[in-house]
Image (tube, grey):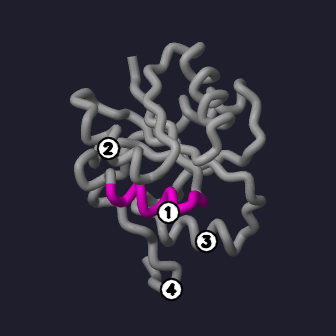
Amino acid sequence: METILVVDDEDQILVAVGEMLEVQGYRILKALSAEAAVRVATDCAEPIHLLLTDIVMPGGSGHDLAQQLSVQRPEMKVLYMTGFTIVERQQQFLDASSSKPDAPVILKPFTSERLTEKVREVLAAKPPSPFDRPRDPWRHA
């Protein structure tokens, strides 16, 4: 059973997302803030396979939380969720500010089916090789 840490500052969303994923057989840990998520992750002895976090939260962003938790749990994958429409410029910022390249994002509102599909996709993704480097578009091969 895979464990997912769900972080959102809105209690109703936190409960709904947790229920959607529990039905699919995931073990769910919940936190209403980045600070609470750090405490939950610290107290959890088992692996946390996925951090599913809101991008914008009072008291700390999802990006900062992912970076902080990746120090103690480098194998943990990250899926961001947001209620804001992401335009190309925001996606570039997200990619650049994330500790993981091409950070996956799911837009709220989403269906249980879409959430499950995205979670499975992220969990199934192979971790990047340390030898994989972004290709320099200005350098000729």
Q: Quadrant of the C terminus?
A: bottom left
- What residue type is disc 3 on? Gln
- What residue type is disc 4 on? Trp
Q: Is residue 60 left or right of residue 90?
A: left
Residue visible at 75% across and 67% down? 87
Residue named by callout 1:
59
Task: Compare residues 86 and 132 and report the one nearer the observer.
Answer: 86
Q: Mark 3 to mark 2: distance in Å?
A: 30 Å
Relative vertical location of residue 81 with respect to residue 20 in this rendering, above or below: below
Residue visible at 50% across and 86% down? 138
Residue named by callout 3:
92
Residue named by callout 2:
39
Residue named by callout 4:
138
Q: Is residue 53 magenta?
A: no
> Decide: marks 2, 1 in contact (CB < 8 A)?
no
- What residue type is disc 1 on? Gly
First to last magenta residue range: 56-68
Mark 4 surroundings: few (<14), some (14-19) or many (≥20) residues within 10 A: few
Q: Mark 4 to mark 1: distance in Å?
A: 39 Å
Mark 1 surroundings: few (<14), some (14-19) or many (≥20) residues within 10 A: few
Nearer mark to the viewer, of 4 and 3: 3
Residue visible at 49% across and 49% down? 33
Q: Which mark is residue 124?
A: none
Looking at the rendered structure, the secondary structure element under dot 4 is loop
Instruction: Tell me which numbered mark, 4 or 3, is placed earlier along the sequence.
Output: 3
Nearer mark to the viewer, of 2 and 4: 2
Q: Quadrant of residue 91?
A: bottom right
Instruction: Tell me which numbered mark, 4 or 1, is placed earlier along the sequence.
Output: 1
Looking at the rendered structure, the secondary structure element under dot 1 is loop
Instruction: Tell me which numbered mark, 2 or 1, is placed earlier along the sequence.
Output: 2
Task: Compare residues 47 and 36 and report the one nearer the observer.
Answer: 36
Q: Mark 3 to mark 1: distance in Å?
A: 23 Å
